[in-house]
């Protein structure tokens, strides 16, 4: 089963993926962007916030996604795959840019993935107050520097992306305890 843990920065994706790894020790743990050698370089470029063109940023993410599917996802489809972000985040960020039509975003992502999408998407959803608190506790990267309003709009766009891609979405309150969140994810995998 291929699942994706989605959510805006600071939602707790990394924590939950680590906890899921303990519960599913044979699972393939991956991330997007950056799970491949090429993907790591693309991730560095994007997080540096140096691209001037939003279209260039979108195409970089598509290149990473195509490589990720080919190298990591396709060879392991018969196993449990737990991904930190997925095509869903890619679509959500592209929707936010507003420079590419929804139809083009969906078609280009289908092209990049060969139509291979997560079977279930788990969204760790944050409130504005909790997001702002968590951001205040860390050094911000290029995406986080865009601010809490931007990140909350991304969170809404993640929901829209799952609708556009026709994926099963499980929304989880990210302000719950780590244990409660893990339990909720595992219960939804049955």
Image (cartoon, rainbow, N blue to C red):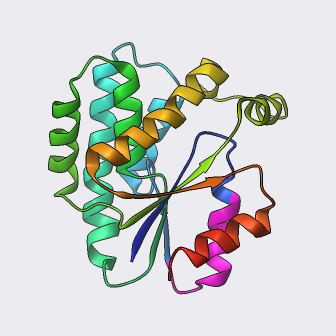
Compared with residue 78, is residue 156 higher up or lower down, i.e. above or below? above
The reply, left or right, for residue 145 in relation to residue 76 is: right
Tell me, yes or no, whether the highlighted magenta stretch contains residue 78: no
Residue 190, x across and y down, in percent: 50, 83
Residue 152 picture quarter:
top right
Tell which of 56 and 93 is nearer to you: 93
Q: Is 53 left, or right, of 188 in this rendering?
A: left
Magenta residues?
15-27
Identify the residue at horizontal 21%, vertical 40% (top origin): 106
Q: Write down the quadrant of residue 114 in the picture.
A: bottom left
At x 44%, y 42%, the residue is 159
Residue at 32% over, 35% down: 60
Q: Residue at x 28, y 41 (%)?
A: 62
Residue furthest toward the top? 52
Vertical side of 24 occupied by 118: above or below: above
At which x and y percent is residue 154? Answer: 50, 31
The answer to whether residue 17 is magenta is yes
Position above or below: 1 against 47: below
Does 93 sit above or below residue 90? above
């Amino acid at each position: 089963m291929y699942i994706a843990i989605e959510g805006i920065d600071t939602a707790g994706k990394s924590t939950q993926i680590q906890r899921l790894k303990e519960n599913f020790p044979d699972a393939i743990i991956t991330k997007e962007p950056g799970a491949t050698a090429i993907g790591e370089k693309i991730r560095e470029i994007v997080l540096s916030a140096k691209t001037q063109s939003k279209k260039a940023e979108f195409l970089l993410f598509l290149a990473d996604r195509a490589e990720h599917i080919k190298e990591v996802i396709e060879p392991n489809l018969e196993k449990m795959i737990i991904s930190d972000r997925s095509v869903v985040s890619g679509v959500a960020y592209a929707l936010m840019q507003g420079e590419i039509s929804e139809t083009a975003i969906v078609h280009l992502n289908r092209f990049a993935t060969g139509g291979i999408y997560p079977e279930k998407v788990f969204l760790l959803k944050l409130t504005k107050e909790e997001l702002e608190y968590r951001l205040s506790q860390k050094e911000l990267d290029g995406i986080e520097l865009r601010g809490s309003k931007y990140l909350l709009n991304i969170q809404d766009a993640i929901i829209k992306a799952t609708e556009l891609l026709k994926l099963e979405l499980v929304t989880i309150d990210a302000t719950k305890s780590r244990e409660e969140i893990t339990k909720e994810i595992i219960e939804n995998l049955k």
